[in-house]
Amino acid sequence: MDELARRRAAREREAGGDDDTVRFTWTDTLAMIIAAYQVLMPIVLLMIGILLVVYLLFRVFFH
């Protein structure tokens, strides 16, 4: 273990174990899933709509 790691470990022990790491709960996970749907769903629906219009145009003009 190098000197820098020893100093860092000593500082963490002196700080009394203040833990600054972020803890995620199930509500945070649910919020991220909902946010992803809000971002991706309009794009997916737009792509489906464009494909449907192209399909119908090909069906009308080339049938």
Image (spheres, helix red, strand yellow):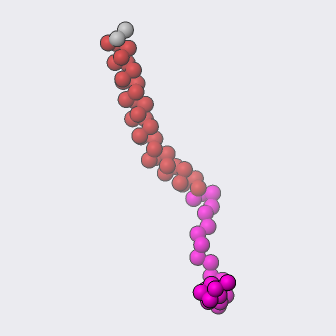
Residue at x-position 44% and y-position 47%: 39
Q: Quarter-wise, where is residue 15 in the image?
A: bottom right
Q: Residue 19, percent across and down?
A: 62, 78
Residue at x-position 41% and y-position 40%: 43
In the rendered image, which quarter contains the N terminus?
Answer: bottom right
As drawn, the residue found furthest toward the top would be 63
Answer whether residue 47 is magenta in the image.
Answer: no
Q: Residue 8, percent across and down?
A: 61, 86
31 displayed left or right of 1: left
Q: From what the image shows, is residue 51 above or below residue 27?
A: above
Q: Residue 53, percent across and down?
A: 36, 24
Residue at x-position 40% and y-position 24%: 52
As drawn, the residue found furthest toward the front would be 2
Q: Is residue 42 visible?
A: yes
In the rendered image, which quarter contains the C terminus?
Answer: top left
Q: Please give the range of residues in magenta.
A: 1-28
Q: Residue 28, percent across and down?
A: 57, 59
Residue at x-position 46% and y-position 41%: 41
